[in-house]
Amino acid sequence: MRPRFTIAGAGGFRRRVQVTWLVLATLLFSLFYNLGLDFGLIGEKLPFMLGLRLSPDGFIQGVALTILITVVSMAVSLVVAVLTALGRLSTNALAFGVATFYASFFRGTPLLVQVLIIYLALPQFGIVLSALTSGVLALSLNYGAYLAETIRAGVLSVPRGQGEAAMALGLSRGVIAFRIIAPQAMRIIIPPAGSHFISMLKDSSLVSIMGLWELNFLAQSYGRATYHYMEMLLTAAAIYWVLSIGLELAQNRLEKRFGRGFAGRQGGAE
């Protein structure tokens, strides 16, 4: 018999984890506090870094802009990834070829180079995109290539017999895809997809090279202006970390939701 993780045991484990996090966070804060950081400067610049104040041209900045770029890129990359995964699973040579070529190019070249190509090289051919559009497009195309492989792996993890049995019952392809295949595939897709989105959140800092006033841009600008790089960069790092924790919590909730049907099987007798 495999030992079962009781509710009481789970509660005790969770409390011990929380205490561990609290102790480590306290030690980390104490370390930075003893560095003699200028917390007054951090408090002065924090509203701007959080995006509570608009930029001089009246546009959002800081965390607000970082979140906007990340959320839009997430949505676009998911659409691109689904289409690419369908192409990778297709028996059509053209669809398969286009999907594999796209995935190979965007996984095989650096994201920074892709950002620069879209923002600086495309204007040579008369295609001029704004900095925001260029950043979102580069992030979406890059992460769409990685997410496509994650989605393909999730779909392939579902036994073929599931779809064949559904077809034998006369269910349509749409019902089979969204009601049978997708819920089972999500259990495999969510963990790596969550990691991709967390990486996308941090890689959104690359758009700062195009002059967008997102979090990383402001941290560097304030660091140069005040000669307090440590305060500004640590503040940016802490904000990125908090945002990443939010994505981790959302990922955990989705994992639990789509893994409910398998928890009972894993806890049973062997």
Image (cartoon, grey):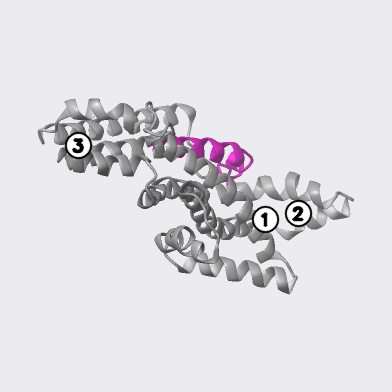
Q: Earlier in the sequence, mark 3 or mark 2?
A: 2
Query: Mark 1: which secondary structure?
Result: loop
Q: Which residue is mark 3?
A: 231
- Which residue appears farthest toward the right when viewing the image? 170
Task: Tell me the number on the disc at residue 71.
Answer: none
Using a 10 Å C-alpha cutoff, classify the residue at mark 1 as few (fewer than 14 neighbours), some (14 to 19) or many (20 or more): some
Q: Which residue is mark 1?
A: 158
Q: Quote the CA–CA distance across marks 2 and 1.
A: 7 Å
Please give left or right for residue 202 compared with residue 164 in the image. Answer: left
> Mark 2 and 1 residues: CB-CB less than 8 Å, in contact?
yes
Percent coordinates x, y for residue 132 in the rendering: 48, 46
Q: Which residues are magenta?
A: 245-270
Query: Mark 3: which secondary structure?
Result: helix
> Mark 3 and 2 residues: CB-CB less than 8 Å, in contact?
no
Q: Which residue is mark 2?
A: 162
Of the residues shown, which amino acid type is indicated by label 3? Glu
